[in-house]
Amino acid sequence: MSLDIFWFLPTSGDTRYLGQSSSGRGVSNDYLRQIAVAADELGYDGILIPTGSGCLDPWVTAATLAPVTKRLKLLLALRTALTKPAAAARMAATLDQATKGRLLLNVVAGGDAAELAGDGIFLDHDERYEEASEFLHIWKALLQGETVNFAGKYHTVENAKNFFEPVQRPYPGLYFGGSSTAAHELAGEHVDAYLSWGEPPAAVAEKIADVKARAARHGRTVRFGVRLHVIVRETTAAAWAAADALISHLDDELISKVQSRLASMDSEGQRRMAALHGGKREQLEISPNLWAGVGLVRGGAGTALVGDPQTVAARLKEYAELGVDSFVLSGYPHLEEAYRFAELVFPLLPGKQWVYGADQVQTGGPFDASTVASTKEPA
């Protein structure tokens, strides 16, 4: 089975060491374009463009990447409560045309009430999923060419029409992640692919089974994916050393402060992430080669697969055996790690290859180590 491998675009900033500002890389469109172009050329299937008050706007960012990428899918985070479904349908159709059918949407209902309040959104946990469901009913109908009349609790439209057809039919694919009952119900009814954060395989299997059953009750099927960080090196020892280095500048005070902030969120997924490490540095390997260190100071996806290429590939295949066919991966810093993962792991995954593989590298030139001893030093 071929796997879809997506990379992540760090639109809130990048770093080499978590918790150390001096190692950070400020957000700039030039840097984000470097990452996207690298992912495109390396053979990644897509790139996730996140949303949030601390992120650059995903729609504008995606528009800047459209002309500099060729085949890369742009998985753009869509926070439904931030816009109206008719406007979002026009935006999606326009961007799908601009990318020649490379747009995907990652539906985000939102898990941080304080952040949402700053954007003028005052909905409790389950209300956010109710709003998203209404939004998607209208959005999907519009992109399928229907004239829509809908009167709901959160959205009302009269004779709504989308005049700009998307390239993809019936509409660009919808991805979504969430761990609560309300989230799973939304996934079962509306989305094409459900993304779980990187929990141990048994926990992911339970979520897959629940979403699959809910989708069946709606007469639908859903694909599945996992969102993970990766720390891969040529040896297992080097990979674990890199994991330790990533959090080597964290102190207990910062960890406590971040965990307190994350605990105030009403996100079930965030609660599950926090439970994996309990805010402690001890026993961060929560499942073979699955490390929860990133989640000590990062909200959202907080686990990483750590190991040599063969081990990381084997762990990805374990998820694939559960029915997962897509992975959204990231690593710090995102530019260098995109190259490292593609070089080391792509050749070990079904349907993937490293496009800059050794068979494409010219050797024997004047600077090549294998021939330098027998050639005259270049001028």
Image (spheres, rainbow, N blue to C red):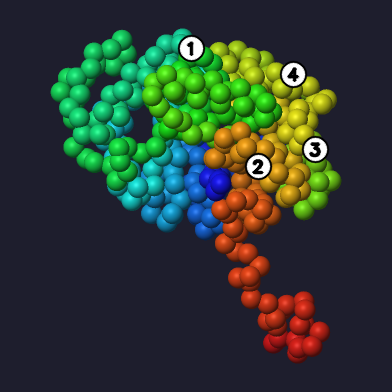
The residue under label 1 is: 125
Amino acid carrying label 1: it is: His
- Is disc 2 surrounded by few (<14), some (14 to 19) or many (20+) residues within 10 Å? some
In the displayed structure, would residue 363 be above or below residue 188? below
Q: What residue is shown at x 79% (from left), y 88% (from top)?
A: 374
Q: Which of the marked residues, 3 or 2, is nearer the chain's N terminus? A: 3
Question: Are there few (<14), some (14-19), or many (20+) residues within 10 Å of tag 3?
Answer: few
Residue 213 in sight from this viewpoint: yes
Asked if residue 198 lies left or right of residue 95, the reply is: right
Label 2 residue SS: helix
Picture coordinates of residue 282, whole percent (x, y): 83, 25
Q: Distance between the residues labelled 3 and 2?
A: 25 Å
In the image shown, does 244 or 170 lie closer to the viewer?
A: 170
Q: Name the residue under label 2.
A: 317
Vertical side of 341 occupied by 272: above or below = above
Distance between mark 4 and mark 2 Cα atoms: 28 Å
Whether pointer 4 and pointer 1 mark residues with C-beta atoms closer than 8 Å, the reply is no
Q: Nearer the viewer, residue 321 or 272?
A: 321
Disc number at residue 278? 4
Kind of residue sitting beneath label 3: Asp
Q: Which residue occupies 61% across, 22% down? A: 206
Closer to the eye: label 1 or 3 = 1
For marks 3 and 4, the one nearer the N-term is 3
Q: Nearer the viewer, mark 3 or mark 2?
A: 2
Count neighbours of disc 4 (C-alpha within 10 A) and say few if under 14, some if 14 to 19, many if 20 or more: some
Closer-to-camera residue (50/157): 157
Q: Which mark is residue 244?
A: 3
User: Residue 369: horizontal and vertical position, in percent?
Assistant: 77, 76
